[in-house]
Image (spheres, helix red, strand yellow):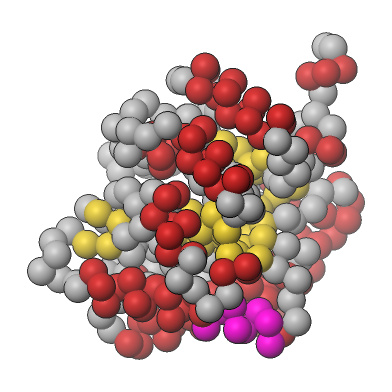
Amino acid sequence: MSDQYIPKSENKFTFGLWTVGNVGRDPFGEPVRETKTPVELVHLLAEVGAWGVNFHDNDLVPIDATPAERDKIVADFKQALADTGLVVPMATTNLFGDPAFRDGAFTSNDPKVRAYALQKTMNAIDLGVELGAKIYVFWGGREGTETDAGKDPITAVKRSREAMNYLCEYVLDQGYDLKFALEAKPNEPRGDIYNATTGNMLAFIATLDHPEMVGVNPEVAHEHMAGLNFTHHVAQAMEAGKLFHIDLNDQAFGRYDQDFRFGSVNLKSAFFLVKLLEDNGYDGSRHFDAHA
């Protein structure tokens, strides 16, 4: 194989535990692959030349883990990182899996759920920083509605803003070297998700108390679900100095979230995206968020 096809650390290729650890379950079928531990996945990624590994809090530490179990899991994960040389550039919170979040996390109508979402996120931020993360992604998969009779959209935006302002203050109070990246998606699992596109997120960021701390994490599939030109949205974020992270995968336009391999559907679009990133000196992670 030519050297130009061998991954190098400067390429900053990263993968999430939730993708390489995907057991092949879908809404209509059971798992088709065996479960691998986070430590096994780190070693697998090292073998194929990855630079980094990313995770949701509960990809690494089960939601029902005891403090002792949590400490053992984290210690083993740290050892795997040390053994392989992989880094953790980004972390995020699972604010969609717990049934408590069925009607939203930061935008839930229940103040107890909103408080739980903030506490869960602060704990997850602590975990991410402990493992070296410099970017923290927020994907509000449950922040939306199936019917607008269930939630006032203006109130929801205000709740989202309050949450982000609170978490920015938490990061500053802790002295963490961490920035936030907001990830948009038009729908799924909710019928409609607030801040549905990268453009929506850029406008929202401008209203925050600490906009300098917050950027975006555009994902190919999510913008293609909305029928949009992904390269143009990334360009807008880059021009604004807000491209803090990027999720690379592929997707047929207007379908459910397919999470195909990058370049496997829209090759020309992928080419111009890579050209945009390379021509303009993008220096962040190239994160591959593909399940299929």
Chain part drawn in magenta: 166-173
Question: Which quadrant of the figure contains the N terminus?
Answer: top right
Q: Is residue 115 visible?
A: yes
Out of 13 and 58, give the one closest to the viewer. 13
- Residue at the front extreme, as displayed: 239
Q: Is residue 255 above or below residue 26?
A: above
Q: Position of residue 72 (x, y in %)?
A: 74, 71
Q: Position of residue 28 (x, y in %)?
A: 28, 39
Q: Which residue sits at x=58%, y=29%? A: 273
Q: Which residue sits at x=81%, y=49%? A: 86
- Residue at the top extreme, as displayed: 1
Q: Is residue 34 visible?
A: no
Task: Quadrant for residue 258, please give it.
Answer: top left
Q: Is residue 215 above or below residue 111?
A: above
Task: Quadrant for residue 125, please give it.
Answer: bottom right
Magenta segment main secondary structure: helix
Q: Is residue 176 above or below residue 21?
A: below
Q: Position of residue 189 (x, y in %)?
A: 30, 53
Out of 176 and 80, give the one closest to the viewer. 176
Q: Is residue 6 above or below residue 27?
A: above
Q: Is residue 157 magenta?
A: no
- Locate residue 231 relative to residue 30 in the image: left or right: right
Q: Which residue sits at x=49%, y=66%? A: 206
Q: Position of residue 239 (x, y in %)?
A: 60, 45
Q: Which residue sits at x=28%, y=84%? A: 110
Image label count: 0
